[in-house]
Image: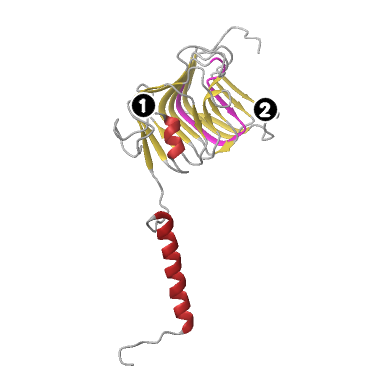
Amino acid sequence: MRGTTILPTNRLIAIGLVALVAVALLAAGGLIRTATAAGAWYVDPAGNDGNTCKGAGAANACLTIQGAIGKAAAGDTINVAAGTFDEAVDLNKVGLTLVGAGAASTTIDYKDFGYNNAGMYVQADNVTVQDLTVTQGILNSTPRYGLKVGISDGVTIDGVTVSNSFRTGLDVLGASNITIDDVALTNNGGHGMQLLDVNGASVSNVTISGTGWNDMSVATWGQYSTLGTSGVVISGTNSFGGNPTDNGG
C-alpha cells in the first residue's frame, strides 16, 4: 500500500512499551518528571513552615530551621535570616549546609529543647554549620551541651558562637576529619570544647573564655567510639581564657 511503512516486530514492541510506561506515569502524577536537586532553602523568624521555603522573606521562607531540614535533601543549603529561633536543631542529612546571617545576627536559642542532649546535634557526614550563634537563653540542666557533633566524617564548624551551655559548649565525640575555625565558646559550664575519640581535627582561630572546666579537652575514652584520638592540629590565632580553679572533673 502506498505511503505505508511496515516496522519490524521488535521495534513495534519497544514503541508499545514506551507508550505504556508514559501512560502509567501520566496517570500516577499528571506529568513525567525527572529528579532534580532541590538546592537552597530559607528560614525567617516571620516565615511559615507551610510555605515553599524556597525563597527569602516572610511570604516564602520556613519559620523553623527543623522545618527546612525536613524539606531539604542531602547536599542542600539552608539559609537562616537574622533573628532569634527558639528551637533545637538536628542536622541529620548528609552534606547539609546551615548558614546564618552572622554570629551576631542569627541566634538559635534552644531553651530546654534538645536532640541527643544537645541544642544542636550533627549526626551526618559532610555537614557545615556557619555564621550563627547557639545559646541557651535561660540556663537549664537539659540539654547539657550546646553544639554536639556525633559519629560523622567531614563536618565543618565555621564562624559559630556557642554560649551559656549547662556543660560543654562544643562537644565532639567519635568524629573524623572535622574542621573548626573562627569559633567563639563563651560562658559554658563544662569544657569550652571537647574532642573525645576524634580522628583528624583541624582547629584554628578559636576564642574560649568563661568555662567551668577546661577551656579545651582532647582525650580518648572508648565508651561510645573506638576511634581513639589522633591527628588533632591546632593553628592560627587562638585565645584561651583559662580557669585557675579546681573543677573536680
Q: Is residue 59 left or right of residue 196?
A: left
Q: Which region shows up in magenta?
A: 166-184
Q: How is the image coloured?
A: secondary structure
Quadrant where the N terminus is found in the figure: bottom left
Label 1 neighbour load within 10 Å: few <14, some 14-19, many 20+:
some
Q: Is residue 57 left or right of residue 113?
A: left
In terms of sequence position, does the residue under pointer 2 or pointer 1 come before the other?
1
Residue at left 49%, top 14%? Answer: 164
Q: CA distance from mark 2 to mark 1?
A: 33 Å
What percent of the width, then of the height, locates residue 5?
A: 36, 87
| Nearer-the-camera pick, 102 or 52 | 52
Q: Amino acid at mark 1?
A: Gly
Quadrant where the C terminus is found in the figure: top right
Label 2 neighbour load within 10 Å: few <14, some 14-19, many 20+:
some
Q: Which residue is mark 1?
A: 102
Residue at left 42%, top 64%? Answer: 23
Q: Choose mark 2 or mark 1, whichever is in front.
A: 1
| Nearer-the-camera pick, 133 or 235 | 133
- Residue 140 got which mark? none
Q: Residue 66 in magenta? A: no
What percent of the width, then of the height, locates residue 64?
A: 41, 29
What percent of the width, then of the height, locates residue 7?
A: 41, 84
Q: Which residue is mark 2?
A: 220
Q: Residue furthest top?
A: 245
| Nearer-the-camera pick, 82 or 226 | 82
